[in-house]
Amino acid sequence: MAVDPSGGSVSLANPQSWNRYMYALDNPMGLVDPDGRVPLPPQNNQKPYNVRGNTLSKVAPQLAKIGGFASGTTGTLTVSNVKSGGTVAQLSSGTYSATLTVNSADVQSTTTTESPVWVDKSKASPGAQQEWDRFSGAVDTHEGGHTAIMNGAAVTLDSALPGLSATGTGATAADATAAANAALGANVQGATNAAVAAADATNVAHDAPPPTGTGHGATQGAVLDTSKDKKK
């Protein structure tokens, strides 16, 4: 951890930004602060789909929409605004060598969650409506875990990028710098791919059968009890 740069994130309209030691406006679960300047909010998108019927029994067969499950979350990491610095030196051969190192970068997590909306819920019995609300809350909890995994991967990647370096050579200083820049871009992409792969593996573990995982939310209550149709 380090003190935030004094002029990069202060806003008179937001007194929280005056604190040089606070991470992401004291909201680490909702914001990512790549370089101590302006926190980037994760893009957590919702993609609802409709299910129909006036009973849970009619709705239940429609819930296997996302790979056989009622819900699912996908995510990506995007790196932008990479700032780097370095040195260029002439070699004894007369060619040049350049080394560039990442100073800061913006990392953003984007997730999309697909989950069901019961459009005929108002036509169902009170017991069925109550069960749907319980089920929907459990689905939200489970998918929120997937979103948190991807958002956490953004924070991890943000920490890994500063200090990443690459070297390039060329006949001129400009050629060497261009080669180093291309190599650094490849390294940044490699780090991003590795972070996404690690998050994907964690998400798979999150969905694994009990006792190691949640059984795609089953242990969290994301299973619809159609017997509640009969409850008044």
Image (cartoon, rainbow, N blue to C red):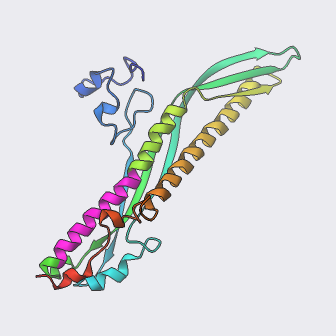
**In this orientation, which residue lies closer to the viewer: 174 or 149?**
149
- Residue at 30 percent across and 31 percent down: it is 25
* Image quarter of the N terminus: top left
Q: Quadrant of residue 36?
A: top left
Q: Is residue 40 left or right of residue 121?
A: right
Taking 212 as reference, is 29 left or right? Answer: left
On the question of residue 175 being in view, the answer is: no
**In this image, 106 relative to 137: left or right?**
right
Q: Mainly helix, strand or loop, the magenta region? A: helix
Q: Identify the residue at horizontal 36%, vertical 42% (top origin).
A: 41
Whether 93 is drawn above or below 220: the answer is: above
The percent position of residue 134, horizontal first and vertical second, equals: 22, 67
- Residue visible at 39% across and 61% down? 214
Residue 102, percent from left and from top: 58, 27
The reply to whether residue 157 is in sight is yes
Quarter holding the C terminus? bottom left
User: Residue at 25% of width from left, 23% of height from top?
Assistant: 12
Residue 59, compared with residue 90, is above or below; it is below
Q: Answer with the quarter of the image where residue 183 lies.
A: top right
In the depicted structure, whether residue 19 falls above or below residue 79: above
**Residue 176, image x and y in percent?**
75, 25
Q: Is residue 228 on the magenta stretch?
A: no
Magenta residue span: 128-147
Residue 64: image x %, image y %?
Answer: 41, 76
Tag count = 0
Instruction: Check the image and report above or below for 37 versus 138.
Output: above
Asked whether residue 145 is drawn in magenta, I would say: yes
Residue 62 falls left or right of residue 56: right
Q: Quadrant of residue 10?
A: top left
